[in-house]
Image (cartoon, rainbow, N blue to C red):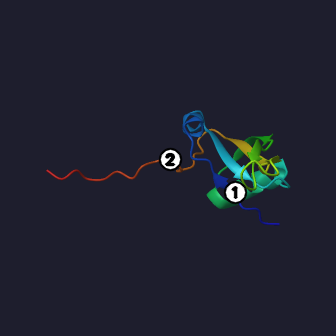
Amino acid sequence: MNIVITPRATEKAYGQSARNIYVFNVPLTANKQQIADAVAEQYGVTIKNVATVVQAGKAVRFSRGKNRYPGTTNRKDTKKAYVTLAEGSSIQIFEQPETEEKK
């Protein structure tokens, strides 16, 4: 089973990458072993640990018309995976390509 994982582009995720921990958005149905296999296959690295967190969707108020039928609903739940890589492994997610400065 192939799962789609995408890196999270946040300040906290960028800070974690300095400690060799990378944060990914993953499907709610994916387990830790599937996540580890997908990251290893996609990026060619060795995985040391995988921790997952499910964030509950926030409650959102909505209205259909002026003061008519107000209600609340919830946004979708999301799942994050904190993947720790083995020593010597790294992923070039947040690395900026070096460009030559024009003089």
| Crowd class of label 2 (few under 14; some 14 to 19; many from 20; radius 10 Å) | few
Name the residue at 54% across, 37% down: 11
Horizontally, is 54 left or right of 12 in the view? right
Image quadrant where residue 41 sits: bottom right
Q: Position of residue 54 (x, y in %)?
A: 80, 42
Front residue of this view, candidates 30 and 64: 64
Q: How many labels were placed on the picture?
A: 2
What's the amino acid at mark 2? Phe
Residue 57: assigned label: none
**Residue beneath disc 2:** 94
Horizontally, is 65 left or right of 71 in the view? left
Front residue of this view, candidates 89 and 24: 24
In the figure, 83 relative to 45: above or below? above
What's the amino acid at mark 1? Ile
**Residue beneath disc 1:** 5
SS class of the residue under badge 2? loop
| Crowd class of label 1 (few under 14; some 14 to 19; many from 20; radius 10 Å) | some
Image quadrant where one finds the N terminus = bottom right
SS class of the residue under badge 1? loop
Name the residue at 57% across, 49% down: 91
Q: Position of residue 65 (x, y in %)?
A: 73, 55
Q: Position of residue 73 (x, y in %)?
A: 81, 48
Looking at the image, do the residues carrying marks 1 and 2 touch, with CB atoms under 8 Å apart?
Answer: no
Considering only order in the chain, which callout, 2 or 1, is on the residue closer to the N terminus? 1
Name the residue at 50% across, 47% down: 94
